[in-house]
Image (cartoon, rainbow, N blue to C red):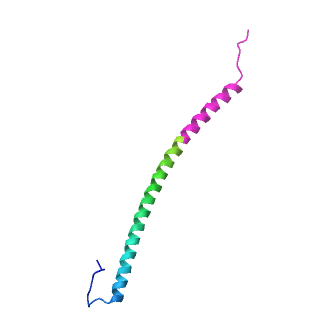
Amino acid sequence: MLKKMDSMLIKEKTLHYVRNLYDDIIQVSENIEIYREMTSGLMDMITISNKMNELMKLHLLEIYRLYFQFTFSITKKPSFPCD
């Protein structure tokens, strides 16, 4: 775009500045795209982590329930009818 511009209206120093500015804008745009993709990946990881946490809560609750039933049934003394 600015590489083949021969004009008496724009000084070489200004042209150099505009080229550098253009390169910087392209770099910032690319960095924004990279950060957007990283943020999207992090959001996916958070969603998966939350689902795993809910699943682990259910599994731990089931283990606790089975453990409680097992220990309660062992500590409970059987009652025999009197003869």
In the image: residue 35, left or right of residue 74: left
Of residues 58 and 7, the one drawn nearer to the viewer in this rendering = 7
In which image quadrant can residue 31 be found?
Answer: bottom left
The reply, left or right, for residue 25 in relation to residue 51 is left
Q: Where the N terminus falls, by quadrant?
A: bottom left
Q: Is residue 44 magenta?
A: no
Q: Determine the residue positioned at 65% across, 28% down.
A: 70
Question: Which residue is rendered at x = 56% and y = 37% of the image?
Answer: 59
* Left or right: where 81 falls relative to 20: right
Q: Position of residue 27 (x, y in %)?
A: 40, 71
User: How many numbered dots are placed on residues in this image?
Assistant: 0
Q: Position of residue 3 (x, y in %)?
A: 30, 80
Q: Residue at x 37, y 74 (%)?
A: 25
Relative height, residue 62 to residue 35 (above, below): above
Q: Left or right: where does residue 44 sit relative to residue 76?
A: left
Residue range corresponding to the magenta coloring = 56-83
Q: Residue furthest front?
A: 4
Q: Quadrant of residue 12?
A: bottom left
